[in-house]
Image (cartoon, rainbow, N blue to C red):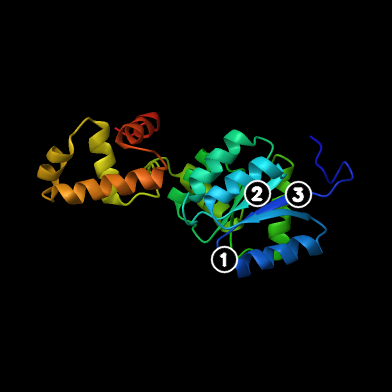
Amino acid sequence: MSTPERDGERLRVLIVDDHPLFRDGLRGLLESARLEVAGEAATGEEAVAQARGLQPDVVLMDLNLPGLHGLEATRQIVRDSPNANVLVVTMYEDDESVFAALRAGARGYLLKGASQGETLRAIRAVANGEAIFGPSVAARVMSYFAAPSLREPRLFPELTEREREILQLIAHGTTNEAIAERLVVSLKTVRNHVSNICAKLQVADRAQAVIRAREAGLS
């Protein structure tokens, strides 16, 4: 598989992070390595739009973004811009975040404390179609597969435990009133949770949330 660098062109990279100082640092690193910064985005929505318009080779994706969560942004970019390889660059190294990113279609996973050399190697690797992990993340992946007794990473890591519980209940067809009675909370509290679930999953209403839950196998 050829890459732009091998074809005499510079790799084009989209930086996605809501912290300007971190974006500036990445921009400086990329430019020093003669990689092209195709664009920058501070929210998930901006990332999806810019990936679609700019068609970069690599997207450096933070997970904790305002608005559209980084996992959903990754999912949409992979769907809409299949030539854009997503490399997650985040502070989260827990199993749930790592495996959720891979399920969303990310090609690699790197922690923000990675060295400059490690970061550049990861960018070039995912641009070449490889799967790449930072050392500590790779160790966690290896441990996970070496220990089959561990639980599967949880679905929808952007949701709280209570929100996931409520999503599971509505996926089973439980009404808001029944949920309130079962959890011993007010109906207003349940409605607020459902609203938060829809916002985090980027769906329009309860029915679409149920579809997302069932497609993901939440039961």
Q: Which mark is residue 19?
A: 1
- Residue 55 place in picture, x, y as percent: 70, 41
**Which of disc 2 and disc 1 is earlier in sequence?**
1
Callout 3 secondary element: strand
- Residue 138 place in picture, x, y as percent: 57, 51
Q: Is residue 83 above or below residue 120?
A: above
Q: Residue at x 38, y 33 (%)?
A: 212
Q: Is residue 129 above or below residue 46?
A: above
- For the residue pair 179 and 191, the one nearer the viewer reads as 191
Q: Would residue 131 be visible to someone looking at this image?
A: no
Q: Which mark is residue 12?
A: 3
Q: Residue at x 23, y 37 (%)?
A: 169
Q: Residue at x 47, y 57 (%)?
A: 66
Q: Amino acid at mark 2?
A: Val
- For the residue pair 86 and 200, the one nearer the viewer reads as 200
- Residue 13 place in picture, x, y as percent: 71, 51
Name the image quarter holding the C terminus.
top left
* Disc 2: which residue: 59
Q: CA distance from mark 3 to mark 2?
A: 9 Å
